[in-house]
Image (cartoon, rainbow, N blue to C red):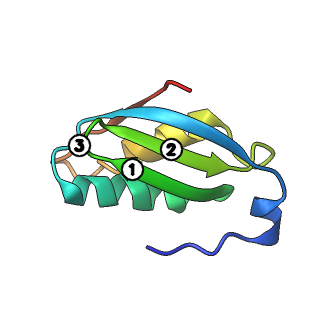
Amino acid sequence: IHKSPSIEERQEKATALLAVDGMGCPNCVNRVRNSLLLVYGVVSASVELDPGRAEVVFNPRLVQPIHLKHAVTAAGGDGRHEYRAYLIG
């Protein structure tokens, strides 16, 4: 998906680096990225299959890293995929 962050979302920015487990293909990368972008407060998300990382720019007044971890987990909620995220930076 393409996201156009609101003015409020862009007012303040922080970056979180997440290690993401469970991704096995480019479709997994898209699922995780799209789930992160759906979180209000996330400005942008870049997800890489190898080495299994996500870099997320977000507004810390609107969302916290724990919400990003939950979004990664929710991306695998189809019964076939299971993703986990760990904050590494």
Asked if the residue under mark 1 is in contact with the one under mark 3, i.e. CB atoms within 8 Å, the reply is yes
Which residue is at 81% across, 45% downward? 61
Label disc, if present, on residue 47 of the rendered structure: 1
Numbered tag placed on residue 55 in the rendering? 2
Res 23 quadrant in image? top left
User: Compared with residue 69, is residue 88 higher up or lower down, i.e. above or below?
Assistant: above
Q: Position of residue 39 (x, y in %)?
A: 58, 56
* Amino acid of disc 2: Glu
Which residue is labeled 3 in the image? 23
Task: Give the distance between the C-alpha atoms of the residues marked 2 and 1, in whole angstroms.
Answer: 6 Å
- Viewer-closest of 56 and 32: 56
Element type where label 2 sits in the image: strand
Q: Nearer the viewer, mark 3 or mark 2?
A: 2
Residue type highlighted by circle 1: Val
Look at the numbered disc 1 and give the secondary structure of its residue. strand
Which of the image's four quarters has the C terminus?
Answer: top right
